[in-house]
Amino acid sequence: MHPVIQEVTDRLVERSRPSRTAYLRRLHAEAEAARLRGPARASLGCANLAHGFAAVGENDKRDLRANVKPGVAIVSSYNDMLSAHQPYEAYPAILKAAVRKAGGVAQFAGGVPAMCDGVTQGRAGMELSLYSREVIAMATAIALSHDMFDASLMLGVCDKIVPGLLIGALHFGHLPAIFVPAGPMTSGLPNKVKARTRQLFAEGKVGKDELLDAEAKSYHSPGTCTFYGTANSNQVMIEVMGLHLPGSTFVNPRTELREALTKAAGRRAVELTAHGPEYTPVGEVVDEKAIVNACVALLATGGSTNHTMHIVAIAAAAGIELLWDDLAELSKAVPLLTRMYPNGQADVNHFQAAGGMQVLIGDLLDAGLLHGDVLTVAGHGLDHYRSAAELKEGELVWEERTEGSTDLDVLRPVSAAFSADGGIHMLDGNLGRAVSKVSAVKEEHLVIEAPAKVFDDQLELLRAFDAGELDGQDFVAVIRYQGPSANGMPELHKLTPPMAVLLDRGQRVAIVTDGRMSGASGKVPAAIHLSPEAADGGPIALVRDGDPIRLDAAAGTLELLVPAGELAARPVQGAPLTDAQWVGTGRELFGAFRRAAGPAERGAGVFALNGHAEAVANGTRPATAQSGIRA
C-alpha cells in the first residue's frame, strides 16, 4: 500500500474504534439472530405476517407463508420526471422475476423521494435539496422496518439519493444491500457547446429559445446526465466501495447488457443473505478501507465537491469518523487520472469507452492506492472489479480487462497522471475551512488576492452582474448565509456562467461561500462549504465590501487580510432568514432540519455518529466528542 493511504486508514480505524466497535457489536448480534431464526419474517406474529403478504400473488404468498425462502426488499427512487430515475419504472418486475428464479421472494418495500437539482437550480426548491438526503435515509429505514426482509436492492443514481439510500441501509447493517444503477443517457450536445451557450445567454448574446434548445440537446433522454457531477461521482464511489456488481456503473439504459446486469443483481441478492452461501452484510462491506477507497476514487477522478460532505455522512452511518483532514492528506497523494466535463471535454460515456471503471480500479490497485483486501457484493477482494461485464451468446460474463486506457485524453494511468494530486483541495485560514475543486481551474487562476464584494443572497450577485456593476474589476465574491443551518445549503451553480464571463474578459474573480457550487462547478476558482458558516457565527459574517481576501488553492489557504483586532471588534453583518421568512415551496416543513443541521465538515446532516451513544454509555468514548450534529 502507498504509505499515505495506509497511514490515513490506520488513523481512521483508531479514531473510529469506539463507535465502529459498538456498531459492529449490534450488527453481529442481529446477524447471529438472523442465522438462527431463518428468514426475518419468521419472527412475525400471524397477523403481522398476513399483512405482509396479503397483496402478493398466490405463488409468492405460499412461499412467504412457508418461511423458507429469503425475502428481498426493493427500495426505489423511481419517478418519471427525472431522466436518471425514469428507467427504474421497469426494474421491480425484472428484479422480482430474477429473485424468484434464484430461490427468493422480492417485494417492493418502499419508494424514496428524488428531486432534481438541475430543475431546482436557483429556485426555492434547491433549499430542500441537501435535507432530502436525510429524508431519503429515513424513508429507506421505514421501507426496511417491517422485519420482512433478508437483503435489499437499492435503486438510485443521483446527488442526495444514493447517499441517503446508503445511510438508511447502514442502519440495517446486518442486511446485504446491492445498489442497482440505471446508467447514463447517451451523449448529446457536447458539454463545451452547452457551457458556451450558457455564457452567451448570460451576456445577452443569445435568447432563451437558443438556450433551451442547447439544454434540450444536452439532456435528451432517459439516463443520468453525462457530465461528471455528483450523480456520476456517486456511481464511481459506489462501485469502488463494492456495492455495485462489477462493471455495471456506466452501461446505458434500455440495452441488453443493462437488463442482464439488473437481473444478475436480483440473483446475487439472494446469494448474499444469511441463509445463502456468501452472507455479506452491508455494514461489513462499508468499513474503513472501503471509505478510504471511495475517497481515493473521488480524488483520482476530480469528482463532485458535494461528496466531501456525503462521504463523511455515509461513514458516520457505519460508525466511522471521517474528517476533512483525511481527505486533505489523501488529496496530496492521489493523482488525477481522468478528464471529464467540467474538468475536460469528455463525458462519462467517453470514459466508459476508454476503459472505464475496470481500468481505473486496476491501475489504482496496482499503484497501491486502493485497498484490495475488502469485502464486496461480488465476493472478497476488489480484484473482482478489474473485470468488465459483457454478453456472450446472450449470457452475462465477466472478463478481466488487461488492456489499459484507449484514450489518454480522458483516462490515464498513474504513471502519466494529469496532475500529481487529487482534483479537490481543502483550504484553511482565518475565515475557516473550505473545499476547492481545482481540477477544472487553470493554474494561473488558482491564486487570487482581491477586494471582497459581499452578497447575502445569490440573486444579489446576479442582479449586480446584469446591471454591469461587476465589470472591469477584480474581486472575490463572498456569498454568505447559504450554509446548512441558514437555508439548507443550496447549490449556487447559477453563478457559474456570469462569473465565467467575467473571467473570460480578463478579470480576476473568485467565489467564497458557505454554500455549495455542485458537482458541475467549473473553471471559476471557488472556496465553498466554508465552515463555520455565517449563521453559526463564522468569520464570513464579519467580511465587508473592499476587505482584501487571498485565496490560494494551490497552497490550501484562505485568508481575510484584516488585522485580527479589527476583525474581533466588528459587529456581525447580515442574518439568515427567520422561520417566518423561510416559507414557501414547503420550506417551512423542514425547519427542524435547519435547526439541527451540523456543519459542512461533519457531513451537514442531522444524524449522530452511529455507535456514538453506545460508546459513551460503555465509557469508551467521551460524551463531549463530536457526533456530527449540533450541540
Image: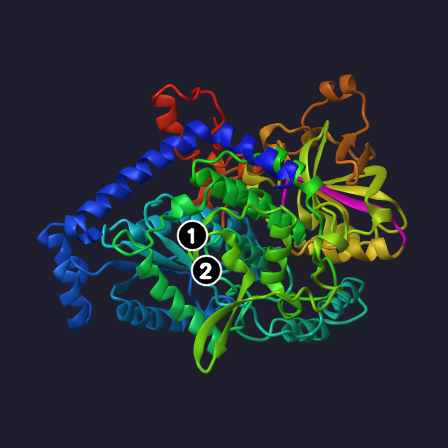
Judged left or right of residue 157, residue 207 is right
Q: Is residue 523 magenta?
A: no
The image shows residue 541 at horizontal and vertical percentages of 68, 31
Question: Looking at the image, which is closer to me, 354 or 596?
Answer: 354
- In the image, residue 143 sits, relative to residue 345, either above or below, namely above
Q: Residue at x 46, y 51 (%)?
A: 586
For disc 1, the marked residue is 165
Which residue is identified by label 2? 156
Element type where label 1 sits in the image: helix
Query: What residue occupies the far left of the structure in this picture?
Result: 46
Where residue 220 sits: x, y (%)?
Answer: 59, 75
Q: Main secondary structure of the magenta part?
A: loop
Whether residue 596 appears in this view of the structure is yes
Of 323 and 230, the residue lying toward us:
323
What amino acid type is highlighted by mark number 2? Gly
Q: Which image quarter: residue 435?
A: top right
The residue range painted magenta reads: 506-518
Neighbour class for label 2 at 10 Å: few (<14), some, many (≥20)?
many
Percent position (x, y) of residue 373? Answer: 50, 46
In front here: 257 or 188? 257
Residue occupying image coordinates x 56% and y 48%: 294
User: Image point 70% across, 58% down: which residue?
Assistant: 338
Point out residue 105 in the picture as x, y percentages from the top left corner. 24, 64
Q: Are marks 2 and 1 in contact (CB under 8 Å)?
A: yes
**Dot 1 amino acid type:** Leu
